[in-house]
Amino acid sequence: MKRVIAYIKDSYNELVHKVSWPTKAELSNSAVVVMFASLIIAVLIGVIDFGFEAVMKFIYSL
C-alpha cells in the first residue's frame, strides 16, 4: 500500500512541477489547427469516396 501512495504522490509532483502545460492561447491555436486539418481530411476522403462510387457505377453499368 505504501508503494501505491508513493506512486500517487510522485505522479502528482511530476504533473504539478515538471510538466509544461500549454497556455490558453496555445491550446486554442492547436484546437483550431486540429479542426481545420480534420475538415480537410474529411473533405478529401469524401471526394475520393464519391470518385470510387462513380467508377463502380460506371463499371457495373457495362
Image (tube, grey):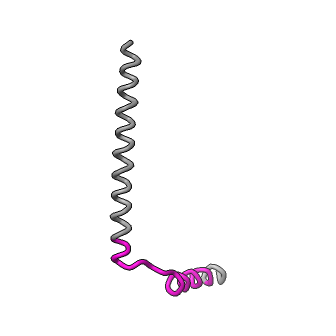
Image spot of residue 41 (x, y percent): 39, 49
In the figure, is residue 7 to the left or right of 19? right
Instruction: Give the magenta range.
Output: 6-28
Vertical side of 27 occupied by 54: above or below: above
Image spot of residue 29 (x, y percent): 35, 69
Residue at x-position 33% and y-position 64%: 32
Image spot of residue 57 (x, y percent): 36, 21
Residue 23 painted magenta: yes
Q: Quadrant of residue 37?
A: bottom left
Question: Outermost residue toward the top?
Answer: 62
Of residues 1 and 16, which is closer to you in this image? 16
Residue at x-position 36% and y-position 47%: 42
Residue at x-position 66% and y-position 81%: 3
Quadrant into which the N terminus falls: bottom right
Per the picture, the main secondary structure of the magenta-coloured stretch is helix
Of residues 3 and 17, which is closer to you in this image? 17
In the figure, is residue 16 to the left or right of 1? left
Residue at x-position 61% and y-position 80%: 7
Vertical side of 50 occupied by 22: above or below: below
